[in-house]
Image (cartoon, rainbow, N blue to C red):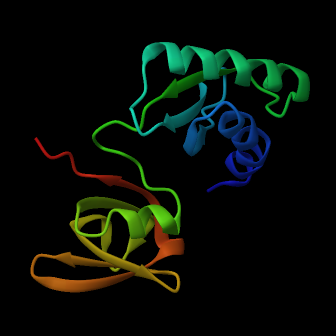
Amino acid sequence: MGTVANNLDHLLRPVIEGMGYECVGIEYLGGGHGRSTLRIYIDTPEGVTVDDCSDVSHQVSGVLDVEDPIQENYTLEVSSPGLDRPLFTPEHYESFAGREVTLRFHGKWEGHRKLTGILKKYAEGVVVLESEGEEVQVPFDAINSARLVPVF
């Protein structure tokens, strides 16, 4: 998680969780020229409705207006994690062991920009995948983003 996203996580997670939602993760995609996006993923055991997203957006907007942690123009998006749920924390990797995931790397890792496989486990800073019949051990720090592959 980048520094801006990490700071936003510390600021917004308590607000979101205080409203009774799980804060799955926060992404800040700085695009410059007013094209930056602050994306917040929320969840509950019952799922997330449009009204839930609206309520969290309203509350978070108030906090952001007061604290003003982002100096440029940005778009705020609040949504459920969806079928292709992003994985942010080691706990997410542990929870979804056995599921197919796609990992995208910071630049290239072992010649790959991305890798898809069955998530075996997370242990001691390493994500273990089974990809193309082989066990692959990926350092957590090499991963830029990870998402579940939707099952239909």
Left or right: residue 96 versus residue 61 is left
Q: Residue at x 66, y 39 (%)?
A: 17
- In the displayed structure, 70 sits above or below 92; it is above
Residue under the point 52% across and 81% down: 125
The outermost residue toward the right is 66
Q: Residue at x 62, y 34 (%)?
A: 20
Compared to residue 6, the image places residue 57 above or below, namely: above
**Foreground residue among 8 and 106:** 8
On the image, the x and y values in percent for residue 134 come to 15, 85
Q: Residue 107: horizontal and vertical position, in percent?
A: 45, 64
Q: Image quadrant for the C terminus?
A: top left
Name the quadrant containing residue 19. top right
Left or right of residue 67, residue 44 in this image: left
**In the rendering, at what x and y percent does residue 96 appear?**
33, 62
Which quadrant of the structure image shows residue 27? Answer: top right
The image position of residue 93, as x and y in percent, is: 41, 66
